[in-house]
Structures are given as C-alpha cells and as structure tokens.
C-alpha cells in the first residue's frame, strides 16, 4: 500500500499556522505582563491620590478648625461678637419670617 | 574545490567543539530543568514573589455637616535594623541631634536595645512630615540605607483638636480604638487587613497582584454632632467651669423632634492624640457616666406623673408648713418658707416640701411607675462606651422617707443624658425618643428606635406652661432671653460624701426653646462650683449663653421690638 504523503504546501501552511499561534500566544502573554505593569502603576497612582485626598481633607479640616478661625477673626482681623441688640430681623413679607 | 587535510582537521575539531558545547548546553538545561528543578523554582519564586499585609485604612468620622472629626493618613515610622552596633549608635546619635521628639524613656530604651544587639528597634512611630524629611536626610547622607529604615503606617488625626473629644475618644499606637466611638465602633471603623501576593521582575517592579485575603477598608461614620455647635458649647462650658472654679461640667444639646445629639460637651477636656497621657477622670464622658442626684430638676418628673394621673391640677393648693416639714425622723426644709403654694408654684419656686406633699398624694407605686416610664434606670442606647444605667431602687427597697426624698430628686442616681431624654418628653409633645449620635455608617442611615407616647397632650400643655413660668418668674429667671419663650427647671443638689468636712453641690438646669414649638432641648450640669452653687446662678446662665448662640446659628428669631424689623 502506498503511504499517503502530505503535500508540501500543506506542510508550509501548518508550520505558518503553528508559528502564528505561537506568536499570538507570546504577544498576548507579553500584553498581559504589560497590562500588569500598567495596572500596578495605576494602583500606586490611585493610592497616592487617595493619600493626597486624605491629607488635603485633614489640612482643610485643620485650617477650618473653629478655634483657629475664631482666633484669626478676633485677633488678626479685629472682629467682635455682636451684642443681642445689634441684631436686626429681616424677613420677606411673603414667608412672614419663617425662614 | 579541494579541501586539504589541514582544513579537514580544523573543521572536524570545530565540529567536535560545537558538539561538546551543545552537549554542555543540553546537560545544563537538563540539570536546571530536571535535577535542580525544585530548588530553582523556589529560588525564582522567592525573588519574584512577595507577600505582604497592608493595613486597612481606618474609616473617617464626620460631623452632621460633613466636617472631618477624625481621619487616618499615611505616615512613616522609623526603625533601626541594628546590623552593626557601632553604625546604629552613630546613626542614633545623629538622630538625637535632629529635632525628633523622643521622651527620656524612649532614648534610654533605644540605647539599651542597640547595646543588647536587638535586630529591630523602633526609633519613633508615625513621624510628622518634617521629622521624616530630617531622618531621610540622615539615612541617605550616611549611606546607611539598610541601618535606618522606614515603614508606612496609618496615623489618626483629629483636626479639630479637643472638639468632641469625649465622643470621639481615641486610638492606640496600632490604630486600635481605646475610648469613645473609636472604641465602641472599632470593628466597623477599623476594617480588615488583607494579604497580597505581588509578582515582580528583576528590577523589583510589580506586574501581578493577587489578593490572598480580601481587604475591607474601615467604614466612614457620620455623626449627628454639629461641630460648630459643639465648639461654642465647649467654649461656654469651659468659661463657666473656670468662672465658678467647678470640678467639672457637662452640656447636652439635642434636637427636640428627632432626638439627634447636636452637641455633647464635658470639661475638663483633652486632645485625643494625647489620650494615653490623660487621666481616666478627664477622659470620662460625664454626659453619660456622671451619676448624681438630680435634685429639683426631677420635680418635672414628679409633676408630670401627678398631672398625668389626674391627681393634681396646676391651681391646687398644698400646705408647705413655713419651710419645715417633718416626715418620720427626717426634717425637710425649703430655702424660702412658704405657708401655702399652688401645684404650679411648687415647681416655679422649687419648694422641696411642696414636692414632698405632691409625692405623698401621688403614692409610691404610681411615682415609681412614672419614674420607670421616663426611662430612668435604663441606658439611652447611645453607641458610646461606659454609659451607666443610673440607680433606681426597686419599690421593695424604699424606706419610709424614700417617697418624699425622691419627690425632689434624692435617693436616685441619674445621668445628664437620662435627664435630657426626660425633659425632651415634655418638649416633644409627650413622646419619648431615645437620643442618638451615630447618624449613618458608610452613607447608610441607621434605623432609629420608635418613639413612645408617655404623656397626654393635656399634661404636656400644663407642664410647658409651668416650666415657662419657672423662667419668667421662678428660679430660672437668669435664663430669660427677650423675645424667646424658654421652658426649664433649675436644680441644686448637695453631694453626699463620706468626708463631710465641706459640702459640695451639683448645679443643673434643663430646658427647651422656643417653649411652645421647641426645636432644642438642653441640659446643663456643673459639678462642685465653688463660689455660687444654685442651679439658677451657675447652670442657668450657661444655658442662656449657649441658647443665645444657638438662636443665631439655628436661625430661631426672637420676637423683638418692631423697630428692629425691616420688611422687604
């Protein structure tokens, strides 16, 4: 019986396919690693930004600390608390001062 | 082309060498991949895989306006790895020259541990930014990267300093809650540490992250406290305590309808970051754990119960025995002698004998039930640690004089928060609501306990009118604010102590405003004022000064003289 021989073209095609698959696999793998790096960088950036946000929040709260604000307003700017008789009631006739 | 024998030999030699090289490469591959496979794999993994446990971030605590009360930020902690004692000592001496805060104890301890040869020695944990910059310079200028190093940790910051310190409490060095809400809500705020596996390349750059244990950041807490109100309440309280040289004081401000605690202040106070250096007496939140005899403020409970039982009417007259009344072996006295007083006058002028007479009319059982209905002897359910229940003796333990003593607020132990809740019943049209301080956790609004009706509308109307009269012409006159009707009651209690060399007092005032449509219920207690001691002289003026500021802040406008009005 004669052995069935693979045609040369078929062999070349299979080799090409194997190579394409191999390269696809490798490039995907490389891409995954690249994404890994990118992801890691983004995570670090997110953490840094979160840290920055927390620091800004705490700084803002510290600056708005009422004790500090009062000190600045009364000592630096020379403001004083109003006396009760200095209050003037202002209201809109429509809502009869309910606001 | 002919190849001569010399060339053939050389070609053969090259071929042999090539074969040997191939064999060597092949053998090396087999050795690495087969014989030393396990060893090499573990070596690679140890170089490229890194497992670490980052700490979860503690949740932030906000007030009702979204202002930060407590927040965690990253900070560096410095340590010596002490590979070489001489190097470590040199570094340590350089650190000492920098302005790094170290106690004498810390210094001795570090030096001792360096000499002992301990491998890991904390220099200081949670450095400030400037301290870190100074230490970083030492690390790199001395080329001692491996001797002095840093770890990143979270550091708790309280930007408002001492504001609301008794509510917030504080944390320990490892961010564990030690007191206040930081302690009672520790499991919620703290979160859960996670385990992370990182795969890194030869340059130690990570490219793969795998969570071995799921992380959970701490949840944010939203309080009902308004830091602006809290601030001026604390300020006014401090001024009063200092003015009267009192031992301590506490103020609770509550939203009448909702039961939200708007402010809860105690003095002396402390900065939460100095918690471990503060005495337990200062740390104690007096609003929930100061147990005292309520004195005349308790007459409100007596009067409400009597009116609710329809046993008395406001105009009913009681004999007051001209200031001296004997019950069994006890003699009751009044500050001012009265022959007869009406029911409402007994409350307005705070007659102890009159209260005792109302108590006698009410009877033990009914009065006891009334006290229990107002919630005395039970915790209010605030999520704060160390709240005390108070002391209400069961009926069977009552002596022959218990009823009359209880009528004017002795033989019972209450806390300021319980008194606030009780006063709020009258302010809130007879409904009792439990006060609360935690509004939401991570944006989820918490369920609140149901309100419970314990007084009828008729009783509420009468009680409001009587309490308004207390401020208009009674013992609480010092609270009067023009244009704003205030309802309240004063209290002055003698402290009963074993060492009776000197008598101490507790002055208190509870009330709400505007009297007919109350928005705020407030209770003030000043412990052991020195120069004056009557509730009307010590606690009531403080109530007034806070109320004046609250009126402006909450935009509750007084009915002032029409000349001060501008109509648009």
Image: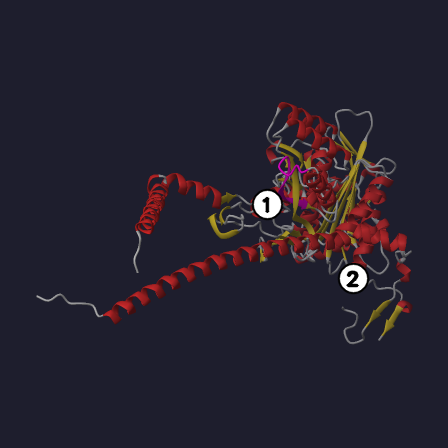
Prevalent SS, magenta region: strand
Closest to the observer, B341 or B34: B34
Cα separation, mark 1 vs mark 2, equals 34 Å
Say which residue appears at 37% left-offset and 40% top-offset: B38
Mark nearer the N terminus (1 vs 2): 1
**Residue B202 appears at what percent x and percent y?**
51, 48
Tag 1 and tag 2, C-beta contact below 8 Å: no
Closest to the observer, B329 or B406: B406
* Above or below, comparing residue B220 to residue A86 in the picture: above
Q: Is residue B452 visible?
A: no
Say which residue appears at 81% left-offset and 63% top-offset: B557
Say which residue appears at 77% left-offset and 39% top-offset: B268
Q: Nearer the viewer, mark 1 or mark 2?
A: 1
Kindly state the secondary structure of the residue where label 2 is placed: loop
**For the N terminus of chain B, which image quadrant?**
bottom left
Neighbourhood count class around disc 1 (C-alpha, 10 Å): few under 14, some 14–19, many 20 upward? some
Q: Which residues are magenta?
A: B143-156
Q: Is residue A89 magenta?
A: no
Q: Is residue B147 magenta?
A: yes
Labels 1 and 2 positioned on one and the same chain = yes
Closest to the observer, A22 or B322: A22
The numbered mark 1 sits on a residue in which chain? B
Closest to the observer, B1 or B63: B1
**For the C terminus of chain B, which image quadrant?**
bottom right
* Above or below, comparing residue B67 to residue B125 in the picture: below
Neighbourhood count class around disc 2 (C-alpha, 10 Å): few under 14, some 14–19, many 20 upward? some
Residue that badge 2 annotates? B556
Residue that badge 1 annotates? B185
Q: Is residue B547 visible?
A: yes
In the picture, the disc for residue B89 is none
């Amino acid at each position: 019986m004669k052995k069935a021989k693979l045609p040369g073209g078929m062999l070349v095609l299979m080799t090409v396919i194997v190579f394409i698959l191999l390269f696809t696999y490798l490039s995907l793998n490389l891409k995954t690693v690249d994404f890994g790096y990118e992801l890691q960088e983004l995570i670090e950036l997110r953490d840094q930004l979160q840290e920055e946000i927390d620091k800004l929040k705490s700084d803002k709260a510290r600056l708005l600390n009422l004790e500090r604000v009062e000190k600045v307003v009364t000592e630096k700017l020379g403001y004083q608390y109003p006396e009760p008789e200095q209050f003037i009631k202002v209201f809109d006739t429509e809502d009869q001062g309910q606001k | 082309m002919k190849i001569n024998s010399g060339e053939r030999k050389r070609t053969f030699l090259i071929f042999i060498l090539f074969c040997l090289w191939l064999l060597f490469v092949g053998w090396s591959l087999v050795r690495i991949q087969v014989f030393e496979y396990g060893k090499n794999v573990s070596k690679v993994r140890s170089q490229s895989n890194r497992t670490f446990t980052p700490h979860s971030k503690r949740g932030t605590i906000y007030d009702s306006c979204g202002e930060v009360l407590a927040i965690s930020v990253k900070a560096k902690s410095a340590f010596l790895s002490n590979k070489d004692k001489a190097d470590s000592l040199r570094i340590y001496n350089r650190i000492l020259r920098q302005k790094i805060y170290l106690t004498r104890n810390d210094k001795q301890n570090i030096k001792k541990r360096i000499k002992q040869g301990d491998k890991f020695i904390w220099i200081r944990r949670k450095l400030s930014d400037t301290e870190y910059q100074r230490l970083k310079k030492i690390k790199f200028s001395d080329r001692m990267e491996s001797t002095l190093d840093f770890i990143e940790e979270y550091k708790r910051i309280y930007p408002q300093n001492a504001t609301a310190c008794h509510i917030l409490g504080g944390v320990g060095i490892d961010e564990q809650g030690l007191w206040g809400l930081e302690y009672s809500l520790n499991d919620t705020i703290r979160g859960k540490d996670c385990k992370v596996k990182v795969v890194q390349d030869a340059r130690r750059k990570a490219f793969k992250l795998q969570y071995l244990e799921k992380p959970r950041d701490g949840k944010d807490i939203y309080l009902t406290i308004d830091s602006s109100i809290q601030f001026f309440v604390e300020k006014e309280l401090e001024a009063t305590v200092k003015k009267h040289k009192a031992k301590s004081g506490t103020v609770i401000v509550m939203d009448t309808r909702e039961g939200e605690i708007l402010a809860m202040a105690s003095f002396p106070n402390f900065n939460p970051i100095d918690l471990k250096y503060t005495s337990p007496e200062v740390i104690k939140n007096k609003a929930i754990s100061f147990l005292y005899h309520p004195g005349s403020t308790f007459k409100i409970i007596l009067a409400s119960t009597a009116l609710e039982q329809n046993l008395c009417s406001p105009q009913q007259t009681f004999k007051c025995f001209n200031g001296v009344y004997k019950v069994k072996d006890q003699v009751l006295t009044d500050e001012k002698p009265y022959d007869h007083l009406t029911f409402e006058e007994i409350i307005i002028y705070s007659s102890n004998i009159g209260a005792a007479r109302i108590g006698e009319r009410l009877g033990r059982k009914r009065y006891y039930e009334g006290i229990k209905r107002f919630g005395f002897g039970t915790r209010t359910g605030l999520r704060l640690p160390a709240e005390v229940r108070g002391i209400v003796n069961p009926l069977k333990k009552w002596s022959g004089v218990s009823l009359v003593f209880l009528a004017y607020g002795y033989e019972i132990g209450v806390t300021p928060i319980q008194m606030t809740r009780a006063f709020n019943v009258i302010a809130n049209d007879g409904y009792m609501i439990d006060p609360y301080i935690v509004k939401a956790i991570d944006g989820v609004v918490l369920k609140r306990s149901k309100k419970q009706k314990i007084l009828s509308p008729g009783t509420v109307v009468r009680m409001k009118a009587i309490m308004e009269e207390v401020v208009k012409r009674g013992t609480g006159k010092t609270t009067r604010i023009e244009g704003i009707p205030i309802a309240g009651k004063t209290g002055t209690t003698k402290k009963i102590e074993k060492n009776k060399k000197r008598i101490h007092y507790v002055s208190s005032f509870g009330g709400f405003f505007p009297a007919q449509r109350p928005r705020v219920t407030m209770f003030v207690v000043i412990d052991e004022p020195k120069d004056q001691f009557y509730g009307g002289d010590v606690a009531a003026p403080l109530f007034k000064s806070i109320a004046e500021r609250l009126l402006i802040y909450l935009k509750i406008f007084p009915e002032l003289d029409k000349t001060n009005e501008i109509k648009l």
